[in-house]
Amino acid sequence: MNQTSNVKKSNSNAGGALAEVFSLAEAKQGDGLSNVSTKDVMIPRIKLLQKMSPECDNASLPEAKAGQIFNSASQNVYDGPTGIRVVPCEYIRTYVEWAPEGTGNKAPVNIHPATSNIMSKAKKSPTDNRFYLDNGNYVEETANHIVLILDDKNNVESRGILTMKSSQLKKSRQWNYMMMTATMESGGKTITPPSYAIVYRLSSIQEETNGKKYFGWTVAKEGFVPTKDVFTTGEAFALAFRQGDVLAAPEGDEPKQIASGDGPERF
Protein backbone atom coordinates (compact mmCIF):
# COMPACT_ATOMS: atom_id res chain seq x y z
CA MET A 1 0.00 0.00 0.00
CA ASN A 2 2.84 2.33 0.89
CA GLN A 3 4.56 1.33 -2.35
CA THR A 4 1.50 2.33 -4.37
CA SER A 5 1.33 5.67 -2.59
CA ASN A 6 5.02 6.30 -3.21
CA VAL A 7 4.66 5.49 -6.89
CA LYS A 8 1.80 7.95 -7.29
CA LYS A 9 3.77 10.63 -5.46
CA SER A 10 6.84 9.91 -7.59
CA ASN A 11 4.80 10.18 -10.80
CA SER A 12 3.34 13.46 -9.61
CA ASN A 13 6.77 14.83 -8.83
CA ALA A 14 8.05 13.66 -12.21
CA GLY A 15 5.22 15.50 -13.93
CA GLY A 16 6.08 18.69 -12.09
CA ALA A 17 9.76 18.35 -12.90
CA LEU A 18 8.94 17.78 -16.56
CA ALA A 19 6.87 20.95 -16.64
CA GLU A 20 9.81 22.88 -15.19
CA VAL A 21 12.22 21.39 -17.73
CA PHE A 22 9.79 22.19 -20.55
CA SER A 23 9.58 25.81 -19.42
CA LEU A 24 13.37 26.10 -19.33
CA ALA A 25 13.78 24.33 -22.66
CA GLU A 26 11.18 26.55 -24.31
CA ALA A 27 13.28 29.60 -23.48
CA LYS A 28 16.39 27.95 -24.97
CA GLN A 29 14.93 26.41 -28.13
CA GLY A 30 17.66 25.20 -30.51
CA ASP A 31 20.47 26.04 -28.10
CA GLY A 32 23.52 23.81 -28.63
CA LEU A 33 22.71 23.26 -32.30
CA SER A 34 23.88 26.59 -33.72
CA ASN A 35 26.80 24.95 -35.55
CA VAL A 36 24.80 22.04 -36.98
CA SER A 37 24.10 22.51 -40.68
CA THR A 38 22.63 20.23 -43.33
CA LYS A 39 26.18 18.92 -43.87
CA ASP A 40 26.08 17.48 -40.36
CA VAL A 41 22.73 15.69 -40.69
CA MET A 42 22.01 12.52 -42.63
CA ILE A 43 18.91 12.90 -44.77
CA PRO A 44 16.79 9.73 -44.67
CA ARG A 45 15.79 7.54 -47.55
CA ILE A 46 12.05 7.24 -48.14
CA LYS A 47 11.56 3.67 -49.32
CA LEU A 48 8.65 1.75 -50.74
CA LEU A 49 9.04 -1.67 -49.13
CA GLN A 50 8.95 -4.84 -51.21
CA LYS A 51 8.58 -8.46 -50.14
CA MET A 52 12.35 -8.97 -50.05
CA SER A 53 13.19 -5.68 -48.31
CA PRO A 54 15.33 -6.39 -45.20
CA GLU A 55 13.06 -4.15 -43.11
CA CYS A 56 10.23 -6.65 -43.58
CA ASP A 57 12.28 -9.29 -41.72
CA ASN A 58 13.27 -6.96 -38.88
CA ALA A 59 11.60 -8.05 -35.63
CA SER A 60 11.89 -4.51 -34.28
CA LEU A 61 9.75 -3.24 -37.17
CA PRO A 62 6.53 -5.30 -36.89
CA GLU A 63 4.61 -2.82 -39.06
CA ALA A 64 7.10 -3.05 -41.92
CA LYS A 65 5.42 -5.03 -44.69
CA ALA A 66 5.52 -5.02 -48.46
CA GLY A 67 3.64 -2.02 -49.80
CA GLN A 68 4.34 0.16 -46.76
CA ILE A 69 6.49 3.31 -46.88
CA PHE A 70 9.58 3.47 -44.67
CA ASN A 71 11.68 6.37 -43.35
CA SER A 72 15.24 5.09 -42.90
CA ALA A 73 16.22 7.66 -40.23
CA SER A 74 13.15 7.91 -38.02
CA GLN A 75 12.23 4.25 -38.67
CA ASN A 76 8.65 5.42 -39.19
CA VAL A 77 6.44 3.10 -41.21
CA TYR A 78 3.62 4.79 -43.15
CA ASP A 79 0.54 3.06 -44.47
CA GLY A 80 1.15 2.51 -48.19
CA PRO A 81 -2.39 2.88 -49.58
CA THR A 82 -2.94 6.04 -47.49
CA GLY A 83 0.44 7.37 -48.49
CA ILE A 84 2.46 10.40 -47.43
CA ARG A 85 2.15 14.09 -48.24
CA VAL A 86 5.34 15.48 -49.73
CA VAL A 87 6.67 18.77 -51.06
CA PRO A 88 9.23 18.23 -53.85
CA CYS A 89 12.20 20.58 -53.49
CA GLU A 90 14.72 19.38 -56.09
CA TYR A 91 15.34 16.59 -58.55
CA ILE A 92 18.41 14.94 -60.03
CA ARG A 93 18.87 11.97 -62.35
CA THR A 94 21.89 9.74 -61.80
CA TYR A 95 23.29 6.50 -63.19
CA VAL A 96 24.19 4.20 -60.33
CA GLU A 97 26.81 1.54 -60.96
CA TRP A 98 26.45 -1.67 -58.95
CA ALA A 99 28.57 -4.78 -58.57
CA PRO A 100 26.85 -8.01 -59.71
CA GLU A 101 24.41 -9.46 -57.20
CA GLY A 102 26.13 -11.60 -54.58
CA THR A 103 29.37 -9.64 -54.83
CA GLY A 104 30.63 -6.35 -53.41
CA ASN A 105 29.48 -4.71 -50.18
CA LYS A 106 25.98 -3.68 -51.33
CA ALA A 107 27.17 -0.10 -51.81
CA PRO A 108 27.23 1.61 -55.20
CA VAL A 109 30.52 1.21 -57.03
CA ASN A 110 30.03 4.65 -58.53
CA ILE A 111 27.32 7.22 -59.09
CA HIS A 112 27.53 8.86 -62.49
CA PRO A 113 25.90 12.24 -63.26
CA ALA A 114 23.15 12.73 -65.81
CA THR A 115 25.74 14.25 -68.17
CA SER A 116 27.81 11.06 -68.15
CA ASN A 117 28.10 8.87 -71.26
CA ILE A 118 28.24 5.73 -69.11
CA MET A 119 25.09 4.25 -70.65
CA SER A 120 26.69 4.29 -74.10
CA LYS A 121 29.28 1.87 -72.70
CA ALA A 122 26.68 -0.54 -71.30
CA LYS A 123 24.89 -3.37 -73.07
CA LYS A 124 21.41 -4.61 -72.19
CA SER A 125 21.26 -8.22 -71.04
CA PRO A 126 18.41 -10.31 -72.49
CA THR A 127 18.41 -12.33 -69.26
CA ASP A 128 17.53 -9.68 -66.69
CA ASN A 129 17.18 -6.53 -68.86
CA ARG A 130 19.94 -4.80 -66.92
CA PHE A 131 22.65 -2.73 -68.58
CA TYR A 132 26.10 -4.25 -68.01
CA LEU A 133 29.54 -2.72 -68.44
CA ASP A 134 32.59 -4.62 -69.68
CA ASN A 135 33.82 -4.82 -66.05
CA GLY A 136 30.78 -6.91 -65.11
CA ASN A 137 29.01 -4.17 -63.15
CA TYR A 138 25.53 -3.02 -64.13
CA VAL A 139 24.15 0.50 -64.31
CA GLU A 140 20.69 1.69 -63.22
CA GLU A 141 19.14 4.96 -64.29
CA THR A 142 17.87 6.47 -61.04
CA ALA A 143 15.52 9.39 -60.41
CA ASN A 144 16.18 11.17 -57.10
CA HIS A 145 13.41 13.36 -55.68
CA ILE A 146 14.44 15.59 -52.76
CA VAL A 147 11.33 16.15 -50.63
CA LEU A 148 9.78 17.39 -47.41
CA ILE A 149 7.25 15.15 -45.65
CA LEU A 150 4.29 16.90 -44.02
CA ASP A 151 2.38 15.55 -41.04
CA ASP A 152 -1.39 15.76 -40.52
CA LYS A 153 -1.04 19.22 -38.97
CA ASN A 154 0.84 20.61 -42.00
CA ASN A 155 4.16 20.72 -40.17
CA VAL A 156 7.39 19.52 -41.78
CA GLU A 157 7.86 16.09 -40.22
CA SER A 158 10.98 15.09 -42.11
CA ARG A 159 13.22 15.76 -45.05
CA GLY A 160 14.02 12.88 -47.34
CA ILE A 161 15.30 11.50 -50.61
CA LEU A 162 12.99 9.32 -52.62
CA THR A 163 14.41 7.31 -55.52
CA MET A 164 12.60 5.76 -58.45
CA LYS A 165 14.17 3.35 -60.91
CA SER A 166 13.34 0.53 -63.30
CA SER A 167 9.55 0.34 -63.77
CA GLN A 168 9.09 3.42 -61.55
CA LEU A 169 11.00 5.75 -63.87
CA LYS A 170 7.75 6.27 -65.77
CA LYS A 171 6.11 7.46 -62.52
CA SER A 172 9.00 9.87 -61.94
CA ARG A 173 8.66 11.33 -65.43
CA GLN A 174 4.92 11.77 -64.96
CA TRP A 175 5.55 13.52 -61.64
CA ASN A 176 8.13 15.81 -63.23
CA TYR A 177 5.60 16.65 -65.96
CA MET A 178 3.01 17.52 -63.29
CA MET A 179 5.50 19.86 -61.64
CA MET A 180 6.60 21.50 -64.88
CA THR A 181 3.05 22.18 -66.06
CA ALA A 182 1.67 23.36 -62.71
CA THR A 183 0.38 26.93 -62.61
CA MET A 184 -0.66 29.43 -59.95
CA GLU A 185 -3.05 32.32 -60.51
CA SER A 186 -3.51 35.50 -58.48
CA GLY A 187 -4.55 39.03 -59.33
CA GLY A 188 -5.00 38.22 -62.98
CA LYS A 189 -1.47 36.80 -63.25
CA THR A 190 -0.55 33.21 -64.06
CA ILE A 191 2.87 31.91 -63.05
CA THR A 192 4.78 28.63 -62.98
CA PRO A 193 5.47 28.18 -59.25
CA PRO A 194 8.58 26.52 -57.82
CA SER A 195 8.21 22.83 -57.14
CA TYR A 196 8.18 23.45 -53.36
CA ALA A 197 4.96 25.48 -53.65
CA ILE A 198 2.84 22.36 -54.19
CA VAL A 199 1.94 19.33 -52.06
CA TYR A 200 1.62 15.86 -53.57
CA ARG A 201 0.39 12.61 -52.07
CA LEU A 202 2.53 9.56 -52.77
CA SER A 203 0.96 6.19 -52.07
CA SER A 204 1.57 2.56 -53.03
CA ILE A 205 -0.23 0.26 -55.41
CA GLN A 206 0.43 -3.35 -56.36
CA GLU A 207 1.65 -3.83 -59.92
CA GLU A 208 2.73 -6.73 -62.09
CA THR A 209 5.33 -7.04 -64.84
CA ASN A 210 6.04 -10.28 -66.68
CA GLY A 211 4.20 -12.26 -64.02
CA LYS A 212 6.13 -10.67 -61.13
CA LYS A 213 4.12 -8.73 -58.56
CA TYR A 214 5.57 -5.78 -56.68
CA PHE A 215 4.54 -2.42 -55.25
CA GLY A 216 4.87 0.83 -57.15
CA TRP A 217 4.19 4.50 -56.51
CA THR A 218 1.15 6.58 -57.33
CA VAL A 219 1.45 10.37 -57.38
CA ALA A 220 -1.45 12.80 -56.99
CA LYS A 221 -1.45 16.58 -56.66
CA GLU A 222 -3.15 17.81 -53.47
CA GLY A 223 -2.78 21.58 -53.72
CA PHE A 224 -0.52 24.45 -52.75
CA VAL A 225 1.60 24.38 -49.59
CA PRO A 226 -0.48 25.33 -46.55
CA THR A 227 1.88 27.86 -44.92
CA LYS A 228 4.71 30.28 -45.57
CA ASP A 229 6.94 28.23 -43.24
CA VAL A 230 6.59 25.13 -45.42
CA PHE A 231 7.43 27.18 -48.52
CA THR A 232 10.56 28.76 -47.00
CA THR A 233 11.70 25.41 -45.57
CA GLY A 234 11.39 23.85 -49.01
CA GLU A 235 13.26 26.76 -50.56
CA ALA A 236 16.10 26.38 -48.05
CA PHE A 237 16.29 22.61 -48.57
CA ALA A 238 16.49 23.08 -52.33
CA LEU A 239 19.33 25.56 -51.89
CA ALA A 240 21.21 23.21 -49.55
CA PHE A 241 20.94 20.47 -52.15
CA ARG A 242 22.29 22.69 -54.94
CA GLN A 243 25.23 23.63 -52.75
CA GLY A 244 26.08 19.95 -52.24
CA ASP A 245 25.13 19.99 -48.56
CA VAL A 246 22.65 17.11 -48.65
CA LEU A 247 23.85 13.80 -47.22
CA ALA A 248 21.95 10.54 -47.56
CA ALA A 249 22.53 6.83 -47.13
CA PRO A 250 21.62 4.46 -49.96
CA GLU A 251 19.88 1.32 -48.77
CA GLY A 252 22.12 -0.39 -46.23
CA ASP A 253 25.17 1.68 -47.09
CA GLU A 254 27.46 4.33 -45.67
CA PRO A 255 26.39 7.97 -46.10
CA LYS A 256 27.58 9.52 -49.33
CA GLN A 257 26.97 12.91 -50.82
CA ILE A 258 24.56 13.95 -53.53
CA ALA A 259 25.89 16.89 -55.49
CA SER A 260 24.19 18.62 -58.37
CA GLY A 261 27.42 19.89 -59.93
CA ASP A 262 29.74 18.33 -62.49
CA GLY A 263 31.50 15.05 -61.87
CA PRO A 264 30.22 11.92 -60.15
CA GLU A 265 27.58 12.62 -57.55
CA ARG A 266 28.55 11.08 -54.25
CA PHE A 267 25.61 9.89 -52.20
Image: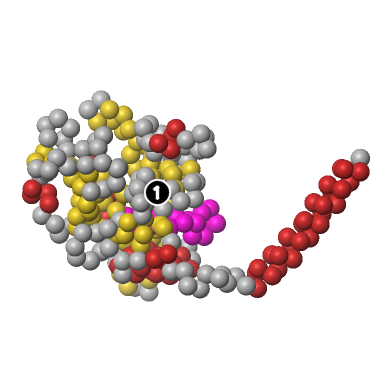
Residue 176, horizontal then vertical, whole percent: 27, 55
Q: Is residue 147 magenta?
A: yes
Q: Is residue 232 magenta?
A: no
Amino acid tagged 1:
Ile
The residue sitting at 22% across, 52% down in the picture is 110
User: In the rendered image, which quarter contains the N terminus?
Assistant: top right
State which region is magenta.
145-161
Q: For residue 208, say whether it is visible.
A: yes
The residue sitting at 52% across, 37% down in the picture is 60
Residue 245, horizontal then vertical, whole percent: 35, 66
Q: Which residue reaches farthest top?
A: 211
Q: Is residue 197 left or right of residue 36?
A: left
Residue 42, horizontal then vertical, whole percent: 41, 58
> Which of the 4 image quarters holds residue 232?
bottom left
Q: Which residue is mark 1?
A: 46
- Give the camera-side residue of 155 and 23: 23
Count every numbered label the image shows and give the total: 1
> Which of the 4 image quarters holds residue 208?
top left
User: In the rendered image, which quarter contains the C terminus?
Assistant: bottom left
Q: Which residue reaches farthest right?
A: 1
Neighbour tally class for label 1: few under 14, some 14-19, many 20 plus, Cα within 10 Å: many
Q: Is residue 41 left or right of residue 95?
A: right
> Which of the 4 image quarters holds residue 145?
bottom left
Instruction: Describe the element under mark 1 as helix, strand or loop.
Output: strand
Q: For residue 194, say whether it is visible.
A: no
